[in-house]
């Protein structure tokens, strides 16, 4: 499946902008959500091909939102790439256990992010 549309879920407007810029320059269509709850809603509405999910957010965190998306029959086919400053091995293992397909640590390195997106496509 070719990835064309990507949903970026992050409570930081700066992070959403940085990630969105990296991806839109490569021709991806970008959707945005600023919380776990709105990320779940946007996944159902926008039908993205990939979700890039922050972890540390108020309300529903990225691990909880990833679990909800990957367990819901309506959205479980959408791969989730966790993108967070939480860089411990235990965080990565936990994120993958919630259903994420991969994990990238902030600060974002454009080449690394694009490589992981390409690998999931």
Image (cartoon, rainbow, N blue to C red):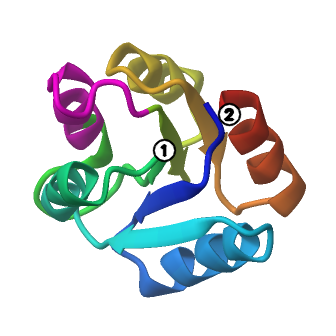
Q: Using the image as rendered, state which of residue 56 and residue 72 is in the foreground.
A: 72
Task: Tell me whether the residue at label 2 lies in contact with that at label 1, contact meaning CB atoms closer than 8 angstroms.
Answer: yes
Instruction: Name the residue rendered at 70%, 63% in the picture.
Output: 107
The disc label shown at residue 121, or none: 2
Image: magenta residue range: 64-78
Q: Residue furthest right?
A: 111
Instruction: Name the residue rendered at 60%, 54% in the picture.
Output: 4
59, above or below 63, in the image: below
Quadrant of the rendering where the N terminus is positioned: top right
Quadrant of the rendering where the C terminus is positioned: top right
- Label 1, secondary structure: give it: loop
- Label 2, secondary structure: give it: loop
Cα separation, mark 2 vs mark 1, equals 8 Å
Q: Judge from the rendering whether residue 77 lies leftward or rightward of residue 38; answer left or right.
A: right
Q: Using the image as rendered, state which of residue 49 and residue 96 is in the foreground.
A: 49
Question: Which picture quadrant has residue 37?
Answer: bottom left
66, above or below 86, in the image: above
Residue 35: image location, x then y, percent: 23, 65
Q: Judge from the rendering whether residue 55 lies leftward or rightward of residue 59; answer left or right.
A: right
Question: Which picture quadrant has residue 18?
Answer: bottom right
In the image, is residue 74 part of the stretch drawn in magenta? yes
The disc label shown at residue 105, or none: none
Residue 116: image location, x then y, percent: 74, 38
Q: Residues within 10 Å of mark 1 (few under 14, many from 20)?
A: many
In the image, is residue 17 part of the stretch drawn in magenta? no
Residue identifier under label 1: 49
């Amino acid at each position: 499946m070719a990835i064309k549309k990507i949903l970026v879920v992050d409570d930081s407007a700066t992070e959403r902008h940085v990630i969105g810029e990296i991806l839109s320059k490569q021709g991806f269509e970008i959707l945005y959500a600023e919380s776990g709850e709105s990320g779940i809603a946007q996944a159902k509405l926008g039908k993205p091909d990939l979700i890039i999910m922050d972890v540390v957010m108020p309300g529903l965190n990225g691990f909880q939102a990833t679990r909800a998306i990957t367990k819901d029959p309506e959205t479980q086919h959408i791969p989730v790439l966790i993108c967070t400053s939480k860089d411990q091995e235990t965080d990565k293992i936990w994120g993958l256990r919630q259903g994420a397909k991969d994990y990238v640590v902030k600060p974002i390195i454009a080449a690394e992010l694009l490589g992981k997106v390409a690998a999931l496509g």
